[in-house]
Image (tube, rainbow, N blue to C red):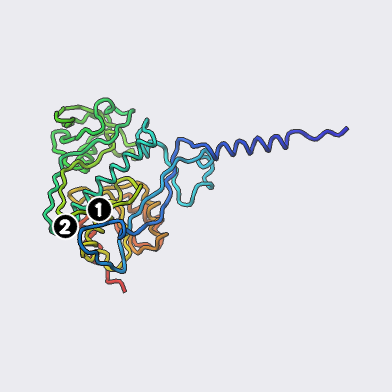
């Protein structure tokens, strides 16, 4: 009596089952994938008539989702241009996906107000915008600041120096060595507290000292005209530079000079352009949209963007005012 060999069929089912499990179930890692740059013209509404141009200002975002176990283990299965990153690059440990999403939407709302204030001030409007510190959005549970700082705290001083913007805090903290203590003046509710918190090494940059918190700009902003920016469910602060450029474009300034201009960078009330994440993926998104120019924060962001920009001209900028000057020097589009 011939017996059917046992093993191949069962092994095949087992392999398929394992692959199915690895594909369907999420890992702890995230994928950052490119999303095509999109024009802002229909997303920004301002009192007054818009003056259309043949070019346009584009914003560039990325898609962020958890990687399946199979995508985590097998690189060729990841989407084109995707970057696999650990969970703590996306959100502080212990933060749920829902909390991360709400934090990103709050950052977006603040970046819209700050960008509008910067653009209107540049145009000569009477803008009342007073930066009053740095608001704490989240605290990593594995750093000395955990238990000391709380979300909604507003940091107003660090090592006896005034803190008005996130850039101020980054510069002061960046000047100390990891492990050293930073003295903070914090407004919590209506009371001010003096705290001392230890610093740590930035997990994404061994040369950088951080406290281990996510922050945003705290400011009292009163705009002289109504500016409505709506990107739907897109979150995060990195579209600030694009917002500010488009507000000026909508109000009649020939910012784009007939070019399709994509921009990314977190903008601060003094016009400083701060680094963002996913620069390489955003360059791919700009390339896919066939834009002419991509403005990015100077430094590592510009270096990463150039790797993937193709024929798109990458212009590194440190401030909003520099971005305007760089665009103004472009030859008229023919």
The percent coordinates of residue 37 (x first, y second) are 37, 57
Q: Relative to 114, does residue 163 appear above or below in the rendering?
A: above
Label 2 and label 1: CA atoms lie apart by 18 Å
SS at mark 2 in the image: helix
Reading the image, the residue beneath label 2 is: 122
Q: Quick check: 79 left or right of 46?
A: right
Residue occupying the far top of the picture: 147
Q: Which residue is mark 1?
A: 228
Relative height, residue 158 to residue 245 (above, below): above
Left or right: where does residue 48 sit relative to residue 289? Answer: left
Q: Residue at x 20, y 51 (%)?
A: 271
Q: Residue at x 80, y 35 (%)?
A: 4
**Which callout, 2 or 1, points at the residue further toward the start of the chain?**
2
Answer with left or right where residue 97 lies relative to residue 208: right
Q: Give residue 141's quadrant in the image.
A: top left
Instruction: Determine if residue 203 is in view.
Output: no
Residue 65: x %, y % from top left? 43, 42
In front of the other: 274 or 68: 68
Q: Secondary structure at mark 1?
A: strand
Residue 36 lies, in percent from the top left, at: 40, 56
Q: Nearer the viewer, residue 110 or 10?
A: 110
Q: Residues within 10 Å of mark 1 (few under 14, many from 20)?
A: some
- 42 relative to 197 in the view: left or right: right
- Between circles 2 and 1, the one closer to the viewer is 1
Q: Residue at x 64, y 37 (%)?
A: 15
Q: Is residue 278 visible?
A: yes
The residue lying furthest to the left in this view is 126
In which quadrant will I find the C terminus?
bottom left
Q: Position of residue 88 (x, y in %)?
A: 38, 36
């Amino acid at each position: 009596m011939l017996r059917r060999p046992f093993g191949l069929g069962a092994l095949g089912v087992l392999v398929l089952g394992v692959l199915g499990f690895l594909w369907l179930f999420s890992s702890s890692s995230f994928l950052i994938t490119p999303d095509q740059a999109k024009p802002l013209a229909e997303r920004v509404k301002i009192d007054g008539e818009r003056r259309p141009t043949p070019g346009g200002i584009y914003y560039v975002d990325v898609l962020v989702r958890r990687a399946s176990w199979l995508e985590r283990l097998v690189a060729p299965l990841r989407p084109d241009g995707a970057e696999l990153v650990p969970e703590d690059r996306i959100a502080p440990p212990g933060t749920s996906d829902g909390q991360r999403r709400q934090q990103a939407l709050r950052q977006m709302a603040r970046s819209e107000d700050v960008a509008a204030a910067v653009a209107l001030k540049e145009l000569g409007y009477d803008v009342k915008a007073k930066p009053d510190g740095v608001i704490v959005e989240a605290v990593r549970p594995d750093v000395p600041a955990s238990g000391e700082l709380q979300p909604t705290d507003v940091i107003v001083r660090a090592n006896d120096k005034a803190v008005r913007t996130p850039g101020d805090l980054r510069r002061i903290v960046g000047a100390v060595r990891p492990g050293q203590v930073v003295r903070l003046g914090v407004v919590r509710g209506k009371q001010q507290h003096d705290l001392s918190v230890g610093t740590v090494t930035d997990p994404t940059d061994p040369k950088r000292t951080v406290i281990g918190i996510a922050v945003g700009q705290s400011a009292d902003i009163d705009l002289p005209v109504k500016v409505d920016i709506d990107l739907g469910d897109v979150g995060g602060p990195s579209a600030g530079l694009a917002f500010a450029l488009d507000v000026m474009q909508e109000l009649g300034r020939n910012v784009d000079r007939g070019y399709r201009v994509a921009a990314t960078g977190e903008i601060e009330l003094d016009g400083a352009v701060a680094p963002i994440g996913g620069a390489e993926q955003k360059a791919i998104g700009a390339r896919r949209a066939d834009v002419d120019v991509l403005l990015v924060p100077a430094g590592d962001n510009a270096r990463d963007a150039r790797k993937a920009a193709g024929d798109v001209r990458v212009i590194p900028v440190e401030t909003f005012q520099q971005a305007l000057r760089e665009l103004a020097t472009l030859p008229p589009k023919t």
